[in-house]
């Protein structure tokens, strides 16, 4: 009888060790899987940013309250309209500039794709942004920056007068 209780105790102990080892393995595997998913997400984000490149070709004022900029997609990323609309435009004089919102009630920026047959800003295509201002431009130096949805920035200075 003593021997059988010893065997039962050892069996219970063995089952406890196996259950504990399984729980530890599951926890470790879950952590590794989570880290792997995070790494893949970060890697995709960095890869996307590295393949995105833009340059401002030309900026000018077309009236005392309107500025136009021609921006070329010189990267290898295709940028759909939904992501173009998530971009930021900054404008102002060289010492003070602000983020310009999307167009609403006569103020803000709009865009148009040149020579495009779809709503995607493909590599080698040009995007024209029009900035409608709520103040009249005066002679001086101005700054314009365009920042894509993933943080790639192109900036330019231009002068009036």
Image (cartoon, helix red, strand yellow):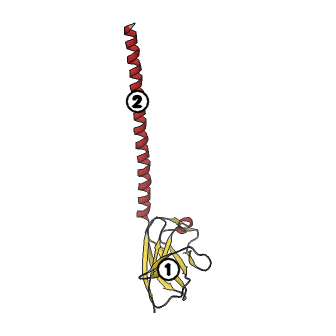
Task: Sort mark 1 into few (<14), some (14-19) or many (20+) by Cα contacts within 10 Å.
Answer: many
Eyeballing the image, is 140 above or below 128?
below
Is the residue under label 2 in contact with that under label 1 (CB below 8 Å)? no
Give percent across and percent down for residue 157.
Answer: 42, 82
Q: Which residue is drawn at 39% across and 22% down?
A: 14
- Can residue 114 be seen by looking at this rendering? no
**Mark 1 → mark 2, Cα distance in angstroms:** 64 Å
Occupied quadrant, residue 102: bottom right
In front: label 1 or label 2: 2
Give percent across and percent down for residue 104.
Answer: 61, 75
Residue 20's disc is 2
Give percent across and percent down for residue 38.
Answer: 43, 50
Look at the numbered disc 1 and give the secondary structure of its residue: strand
Q: Circle 1 sits on which residue?
A: 69
- Nearer-the-camera pick, 157 or 28: 28
Residue farthest top in this picture:
1
Occupied quadrant, residue 12: top left
Image quarter hosting the N terminus: top left
Look at the numbered disc 2 and give the secondary structure of its residue: helix
Left or right: 56 in relation to 106? left
Residue farthest right in this picture:
105
User: Considering only order in the chain, which callout, 2 or 1, is on the residue closer to the N terminus?
Assistant: 2
Residue 108's disc is none
- Can residue 33 be seen by looking at this rendering? yes
- Nearer-the-camera pick, 148 or 26: 26
Give percent across and percent down for residue 36.
Answer: 41, 47
């Amino acid at each position: 009888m003593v021997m059988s209780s010893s065997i039962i105790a050892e069996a219970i102990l063995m089952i406890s060790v196996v259950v504990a080892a399984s729980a530890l393995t599951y926890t470790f595997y879950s952590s590794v899987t989570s880290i792997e998913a995070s790494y893949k997400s970060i890697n995709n984000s960095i890869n996307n940013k590295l393949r995105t490149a833009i340059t401002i070709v030309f900026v000018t004022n077309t009236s005392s309250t309107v500025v136009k900029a021609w921006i070329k997609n010189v990267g290898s990323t295709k940028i759909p309209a939904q992501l173009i609309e998530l971009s930021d435009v900054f404008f102002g004089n060289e010492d003070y500039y602000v983020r310009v919102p999307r167009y609403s009630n006569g103020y803000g920026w709009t865009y148009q794709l040149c020579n495009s047959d779809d709503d995607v800003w493909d590599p080698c295509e040009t995007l024209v942004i029009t900035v409608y201002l709520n103040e009249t431009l005066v002679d001086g130096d101005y700054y314009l920056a365009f920042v894509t949805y993933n943080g790639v920035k192109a900036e330019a200075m231009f002068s009036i007068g």
